[in-house]
Amino acid sequence: KSFDDDCWSMERQNETVNLMAAIHKPIICKVQGNCLAGGTDLALACDMVIAADTARIGFPATRANGSPPAHMWFYHVGPQWAKRLLLTGDSLAGRDAARLGLVMEAVPAEQLEAEVDELARRLSFVDADLLSANKRIVNLALELSGASTLQRLAVENDARAHLSQGPRRAQFKADMEAVGLKEALKSRDAPFGDGMIKLHALGRD
């Protein structure tokens, strides 16, 4: 695809993702298991994210494939951690994602359903118009800090990244053609080991 075709296609996809932020009703995202690449686009567009403490959250596609076309990373974790996550493609366990603010809260997997249900129950006691007013003012703050514009620029940045001629991207493309997606992903990620950031190793316990 041309650069323009790529941008057009991803802008249409982002319209669906961005709708979750624009809709007046609050949306709680419940994360268990793997929430990777496009899964994070969906999760971070929601109003609140609660994860299992063992969930795996990250964007490993930045290692050879592109950049998040829906970019809320900066707004959740700030510039240094956004760079740390996107420059390596490493992931966080749910418990560590909560400590950094990438998700709102992390709980044991067996408590996840009850935790999300309890938050939804508490929201249900507030009039819908008030929920809408309070969601909208926070969204307006995000707009004033450039979030809407950044989403469009993130699409263009991802399209630009798709044009990379570097050896890692070239190898991934060749692996895709020769052995398919599963093996191409294994080859892409092998140099990174388990690819998990462990905050306790950084003195954050």
Image (tube, rainbow, N blue to C red):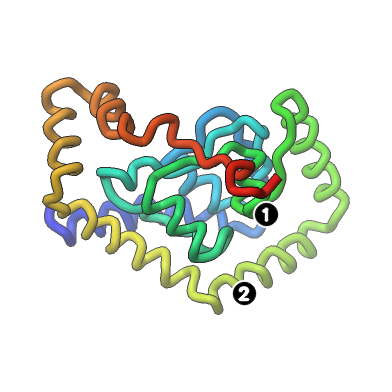
Question: Visible in this render: residue 27?
Answer: no
- In the figure, is residue 169 to the left or right of 66? left
Task: Identify the residue at horizontal 51%, vertical 31% (top origin).
Answer: 34
* Figure quadrant of the C terminus: top right
Where is residue 2, by image quadrant? bottom left
Q: Position of residue 5 (x, y in %)?
A: 18, 56
Assess disc 1: are there few (<14), some (14-19) or many (≥20) residues with their C-alpha within 10 Å of its C-alpha: some
Q: Is residue 86 left or right of residue 139?
A: left
Which residue sits at x=58%, y=37%?
93
Residue type pointed to by label 2: Ala
Name which of mark 2 and mark 1 comes first in the sequence: 1
- In the depicted view, which residue is nearer to us: 58 or 115? 58
Q: Report the number of discs.
A: 2
Foreground disc of the pair 2, 1: 2
Q: Quadrant of residue 173?
A: top left
- Label 2, label 1: how many angstroms apart (C-alpha)? 17 Å
Q: Which residue bears the numbered disc 1? A: 25
Q: Residues within 10 Å of mark 2 (few under 14, many from 20)?
A: few
Q: Are marks 2 and 1 in contact (CB under 8 Å)?
A: no
What element does badge 1 sit on?
A: loop
From this view, report whether residue 138 is shown above or below residue 83.
below
Residue type at mark 1: give it. Lys
Secondary element type, mark 2: helix
Residue 63, position as x, y percentages in the image: 31, 44
**Mark 2 = which residue?**
141
> Residue 109: image x %, image y %?
70, 27
